[in-house]
Each structure stands twice: as structure tokens, then as C-alpha cells.
Image (cartoon, rainbow, N blue to C red):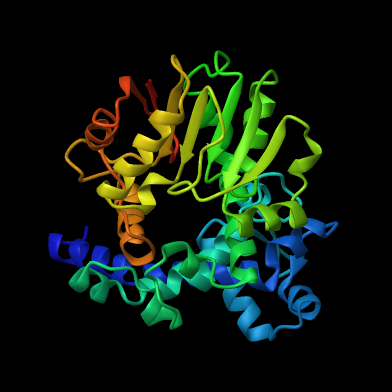
Amino acid sequence: MSSPEEQAYRLLTEYSNGFMVSQVLFAACELGVFDLLAEALEPLGAVAVAARLGSSLHGTELLLDTCVSLKLLHAETRRGKALYQNTELSRTYLARASPQYQGNMLRYLARTTYLCWGHLAQAVRDGKNQYPEAFGVPSDELFTAIYRSEGERLQFMRALEDVWSVSGRRVLAAFDLSPFPLICDVGGCSGALAKECTSLYPGCQVTVFDIPEVVQTAKKHFSFLEDTRISFREGDFFKDPLPEADLYILARVLHDWTDTRCSQLLARVHRACKPGGGVLLIESLLDADGRGPLTTQLYSLNMLVQTEGRERTPGQYRALLAPAGFQDVQCRRTGGIYDAILARR
């Protein structure tokens, strides 16, 4: 049995090697390992995988066996030869043909988020996001930095589509939203959450409200416009009139902004909201003391390196909602990554 000192050192090593685990996942996705194995009619050996991917045999063997240790792949030995196939995890989330595919989000994490995190220490020092250091772009206007090119904007929108394909239905079902027939998804991006909403509540109409560049990209690259219950409207939610609605959804929006900016936005939503209407916040909630869950704490640090905001506790969201005029604030933990808070006008 190992000593406490050895256990502590093993834990330290696990933490310090965490970035390597991320890169194994990112590389396997980028190379197309999981798609190849999903399309194969039978398990494949490293020679076949390397040949079809155009990669080195040596590197492919190392990557495949590490994926086995991470439970991303399953390996069995036949006649002294290892044959690889996807696990349930990779079939569900890492194969492009799956409706719950998360590859777009992983690609965004690998190409954008990962680079910002390389400047975490500086972000802690100065309390600002790290787009200038990571990409050489100014970040005075936050979403000008986030959407710094059409390709980056499309990648971000596809990443959010991945998120809501897994988490959307759960958070929208946290409360019964059927009493709200007219819904506005503020900052609703591609319309992916709106699609989940109309699927769960067939009687509702959803207006996706976002800046012109996002709406134009959504109309060009996403198919949600085929649903006549979903419409798009262009505007800046800090400046322009909000669409009329019974319920305003702010999903992964407030965590981008300072308390001051959140208060401004919530006050605008309250003024636009019909009497008896409400606002639904969808965010990853911290515990009351702010010291968990770990995933949400990491997301909060990610807000530091990528935005102007942070993740918050239920109490902190209540403190933002009450001064804006909202009442009857209810918080529901969903058991997933994202939780829901419903408040009434």
C-alpha cells in the first residue's frame, strides 16, 4: 500500500498531466479516429487505422492505446493483434453521425479556449480576458473578440449547438414552460436551444434575438429556420428593443458579463416582459459557498480568461434579479452541467 506522500505525489502528477489528457482527446477527434471506427464494419488494427488516416503507425499505436486507457476506445487481442473499436462514450459523443456529437465543442476548446488558458496566470493578475495575448485582437467589445472572424463565429455557434443537443431538453424541462406561449431566446445564437424548446413545448413560438452577424450566419448554415415556430430577429440586447414575449430565456448569457452589465440587461428584460411573464436563466450554478462543483469552478475561471464575467451561486443570481424587479425566484438543480432559475415579473 502506498504512503500518504506517494498518494499525494500521484495526485499532483495526475493534475499536472491533465492538459495531456485533453490533447489526446482533441487529437483523436481532429484525426478522425472515432468517425473511422464508427464507420468500420468491424474492429480495426493500428495498421489499418494508420493507413486510412494517413498517420504514422508508431504515433497511431500510442494514441489508440492511450485512448483505451481513457476508456475512449475498447481493445481486444486476436491472434496477438490488438483490434480497436469505440466505447459507448465515444459512440455517443465523439462520432459525427451521433445526434449528441460534441466534436464541434471539442474543436472550439482545442483551438480557442485552450490557447486562452495558456495565459491564466496573467488573467488572474489583471482580471481581464486574454484575447489580446492569445490572438492579438482587442477585447474592449467582448463579442467582437469572440466572433473575430466568420469561421470563428461559425465554430462557436456549432459548439453551442452541441451543448444544447445534450443539455437543452433537461434544463427546459426543469420548469413547466407551457404557460408561456411566446418565448424570446435572448442571445439565442443558432437557434439550437429554440429547437429543443419547440420540441418539448409544441404550442410555443420562439423568437431568437441576436446580433445581425449571428442571425445571418444562422440563416446561412443552420436548418432551424425550417421550423415555422422559430423566428429570428436582429439586435443588440443591451441597446435595441427586445421582442415581445411571455418568457425571456437567457442561456449562458449572464455568465459572460459583470454584475453591472447583468443588472442592466435584466432591467431591460423586466421592462419588456409582459405582466405575469418571466425570465428563465440557464447557467452552471456554483454551490452556495462558491467552492464547487469543480466543473463549474473551472467554467468560472474560463469566464475569466474568455469573457468579462463569472459563474455564480443561486444567491448571487437572486441578488441580480430582485433589484431588476423580478419576484418569486425559483432555482432548480437539474443533475446535469446546467441548471435553471425561473423568476416572474
| Residue 67 is at least partly visible in this image | no
The relative height of residue 189 versus residue 339 in the rendered view (above or below) is: below
x then y, percent, for residue 226 = 81, 39
Residue drawn at (56%, 47%) of the image: 163
Q: Position of residue 93 (x, y in %)?
A: 62, 50
Quadrant housing residue 51: bottom right
In which quadrant will I find the N terminus?
bottom left
Give the residue displayed 28% in from the left and 41% down from the top. 286
In the figure, residue 52 lies in which quadrant?
bottom right
Residue at (64%, 43%) from the top-left corner?
233
Q: Depth check: 207 or 108 in front? A: 207
Q: In terms of depth relative to the viewer, which is nearer, 301 or 204?
A: 204
Q: Is residue 43 above or below residue 100?
A: below
221 to the left or right of 75: right
Q: Residue at x 42, y 34 (%)?
A: 269
Q: Single out the residue that lies furthest toward the right.
A: 41
Compared to residue 66, the image places residue 321 above or below, namely above
Q: Give residue 249's position: percent from left, percent from top.
A: 49, 34
Where is residue 78? Give x, y as percent. 74, 63
